[in-house]
Amino acid sequence: MKYEKFLLLMIVFLSLTVTACANESKVNVIPEVEDDDIKIVFQKRIENQNDYEYFREITQKEQVRKVKEIINDADWENAEVEMVEPPHYKFRFRNLSPEETDRYEVWISPKNDKLEIYCRNNGYTQLTKENSSLLFEILTGETQSDLKGLLN
């Protein structure tokens, strides 16, 4: 009888665990902080070097909110990546606590239609074409049709 109760308890526990994992909601990659307190510092690679220069700073509340939304909604894979070349761009959210200032490395896909992002604490993601275009425009101030020109 004790064995049957134990077995039943284990089945219920495992069922609840599986259900909880299946219903797990997305975890916010960017912590919830008032957008007024955050800015995005954006750098671009200097020609074909592995060196970067300050490109621009995004301080508009709506743009910061949209970048956070794109990053949080992305399908992140827990993976280490090794790309053929250094990132085309880098950006960082500022005015968060030091442990929350992850650097995001951004590559433009070979077809020039998507952005691929790597963050040491979050992993790797390839954005949809729509989100790639929107993020690219916010970060660079250019439209995605200007991708080829910005790569040179």
Image (tube, rainbow, N blue to C red):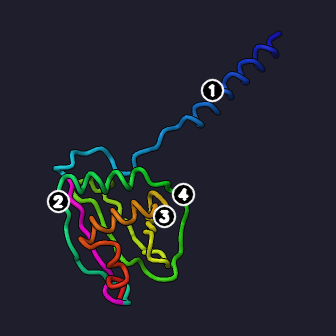
Task: Tell me which segment is drawn in magenta.
Answer: 38-47
Residue type at numbered disc 4: Asn
Residue 78 badge: 4
Does label 2 or label 4 sit earlier along the sequence?
Answer: 2
**Quadrant in which the N terminus is drawn:** top right
Using the image, determine if residue 29 lies above or below residue 145: above
Using the image, determine if residue 17 lies above or below residue 2: below
Using the image, determine if residue 12 lies above or below residue 40: above
- Residue 25 counted in the magenta span: no
Residue receiving disc 1: 16
Residue at 40% across, 61% down: 130
Q: Residues within 10 Å of mark 1 (few under 14, many from 20)?
A: few
Q: Nearer the viewer, residue 15 or 107?
A: 107
Residue 59 badge: 2
Look at discs 2 and 4 and give the one toward the viewer: 2
Residue receiving disc 3: 126
